[in-house]
Amino acid sequence: MKKVSLLFVLLLTVYAQQGCKQLANLTKFHINYNTHVTIKKTLGIDLPITVLTPNITTNSSSEFAAKNTHKNLIDFINLSELDMTITSPQSSTFDFLKNIEISISANGLPDKKIAWLDNIPKTGLKHIVLDVSTDDLKEYIKQDSFVLKTKTTTRELISHDTDIAIHCNFFVDAKILGL
C-alpha cells in the first residue's frame, strides 16, 4: 500500500509541475513589427549615415488584450530577432555596408541600442540577421509608437537609393489577468 501511495504522490507531483510549466508558457508570447528604411545614395565611404524609420504604431494594448493581459502586467520584453531584407533595387546586396546599428526611441525615453552587425561580409547577401541586445524594452513597446534609428557605415559608394524591409520579433513575458 505504501508503494502505491508513494507512486500516486510522485505522479501527482510530476503532473502538477507540468501544469505549472504549461501555465507559465501561457504568459509568454511574441509580437512582430515590420517597417522599412531607405538608405540614400552616398557621396562618401566610411561616413556614418543615420536614417529614421517611420513611426511604428505598437497597438500594444490590443496585442496584450488578445493574450489576456495588460501593459501593467508585463514583466519583461526583449528583442529576440531583427532581420533585414533588401527590397529594391532587385540587383542590390548588403555588400555596400560595413556596419549597421539599430537603436529604438520612444516618447520621453532615451535612445537604446538594440541590434547591430559589424563587418558585414561582402558575399552578395540580400538578407541579414543582426545581433540583438537582451535589454528589457517593455517601456518602449508599451508606448503608442516607437522609432528605429538605423546608423550605417558604408564600405563603398552607393549610386542608387536602397530600400530595406526590417522585421522585429519581440519576446514578451507577462502575467495573465486573474492569475
Image (cartoon, helix red, strand yellow):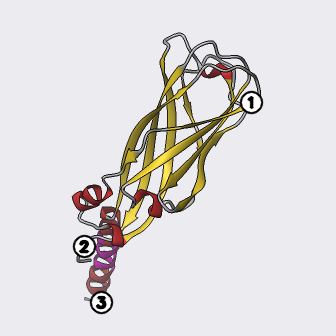
Look at mark 2 in the image and give the residue it sits on: 177
Residue 66: x and y, percent? 22, 57
Q: Amino acid at mark 2?
A: Leu
Residue 144 visible in the displayed image: yes
Q: Is residue 12 magenta?
A: yes
Q: For the residue carrying disc 2, how many other residues have a C-alpha within 10 Å: few (<14), some (14-19), or many (20+)?
A: few
Instruction: Indicate the quadrant containing the C terminus: top left, top right, bottom left or bottom right.
Output: bottom left
Q: Residue furthest bottom?
A: 2
Q: Is residue 23 above or below residue 66?
A: below
Q: Main secondary structure of the magenta part?
A: helix
Relative to 159, say whether 133 is above or below.
below
Q: Between residue 6 and residue 123, name the one nearer to us.
A: 123
Q: For the residue labelled by badge 2, is the local secondary structure a helix, a strand or a loop?
A: loop
Q: Circle 3 — which element?
A: helix
Residue occupied by mark 1: 47
Which stretch appears magenta? 10-19
Callout 1 environment at 10 Å: few (<14), some (14 to 19), or many (20+)? Answer: few
The amino acid at mark 1 is: Leu
Q: Residue at x 30, y 53 (%)?
A: 59
| Dot 3 and dot 2 residues touching (CB under 8 Å) | no
- Going from N to C along the chain, the mark reached first, 1 or 3, is 3
Decide: marks 1, 2 in contact (CB < 8 A)? no
Q: Disc number at residue 2?
A: 3
Q: Amino acid at mark 3?
A: Lys
One can see residue 133 in this view: no
Q: Report whether 49 appears left or right of 90.
A: right
Number of residues whose C-alpha sits closer than 10 Å to that of mark 3, classed few (under 14), some (14–19) or many (20 or more): few
| Residue 68: percent from left, percent from top | 23, 64
Residue 8 at x, y percent in the picture: 26, 80
Q: Nearer the viewer, residue 163 or 11?
A: 163
**Measured Cα–Cα span from mark 1 to mark 3:** 76 Å
